[in-house]
Image: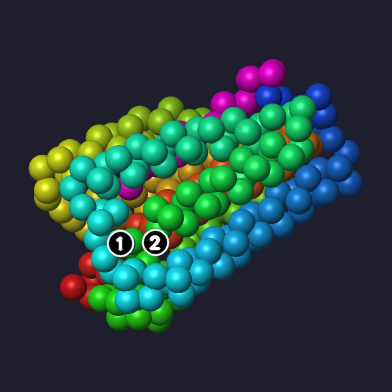
Amino acid sequence: MSTNNPNTFNNDFYAPTDLFAAAASADERAGFITKTYLYLIGAVLAMIGLEIIYFNLLGEQAIRVAGTLTSGFTWLIVLGVFMGVQWVADMWARNAASPVMQIAGLALYTVVASIVLFPLLTIALLVGGGTQIIVSAGIAAGGLFALMTLAVFITRQDFSFLRTFLIFGGMAALGLVVISILFGFSLGPIFIYAMITLACGYILYDTSNVLHHYRIGQHAAASLALLASLFILFWYVLQLFLSSRE
């Protein structure tokens, strides 16, 4: 599974002219943070709704579609397209000139991420023990996300120093994923634990950016970054749960 690269914050073309959240008034900062997490919750709920629609539409064909998407080089193409779409979505979400484009970027990522997640949910639902394992993984991932978020909001620490580690960790993880697909071997539980750790690092990094490096008008871009990190976390927590059942 691919990882999202840490965002940069020096692109003036996409940066609104508003103050950074850290330098804004308390009311402006609170409003920005509230919007960011409301957008995040909305995107998560939308993704859940899309998954329900997929299963209702496909019915018994769900396992066949999931198998087609994850077969050999097809899965490699899917991941490549997903990474490209994520880049486009992030660029749209940072477009200061158009609030509509910002929402469109978040919506684009949400839809495509739900498609990429569908095969794994199908395996969990039809092979791994049903909705219980999905709910359990969701609770575990949500709990970890909440803990990382609280750690940042309580300490007010700027975790931008993690950027280099996250970039190289993400590149190494992506390389291993590609190699595993090309040569058809499993990466094993150690890799899953490492990816969960990396995802937690992304959450610390993205959350501290919400407090320190995003501008007041960038709530769509901030929520997209958080959603991408939460997506990676849930993906590997669910894989961990499935591997423990096996």
> Quick one: label 2, few (<14), some, or many (20+) residues within 10 Å?
many
Residue 206 image-quadrant placement: top right
- The colour mode here is rainbow
Q: Which residue is mark 2?
A: 118
Confirm whether the magenta stretch covers residue 44.
no
Confirm whether the magenta stretch covers residue 2.
yes
Give x and y (percent) for residue 17.
81, 24
Identify which residue is drawn at 27% across, 47% down. Answer: 75
Identify which residue is drawn at 33% across, 32% down. Answer: 171
Q: Amino acid at mark 2?
A: Phe
Label 1 element class: helix
Give the main secondary structure, helix, strand or loop, of the magenta stretch.
loop
Q: Which residues are magenta?
A: 1-13
> Quick one: label 1, few (<14), some, or many (20+) residues within 10 Å?
many
Q: Which residue is mark 1?
A: 66
The reply to whether residue 69 is visible in this rendering is yes
Residue 190's disc is none
What is the spatial separation of the Cα atoms under label 1 and label 2, in whole angstroms? 7 Å
Answer with left or right where residue 146 lies relative to residue 37. left
Residue 229 drawn above or below residue 166: below
Identify which residue is drawn at 62% across, 25% down. Answer: 9
Closer-to-camera residue (78/215): 78
Please report whichever mark, 1 or 2, sits nearer to the chain's N-terminal start: 1
Q: What quarter of the picture does the C terminus occupy? A: bottom left
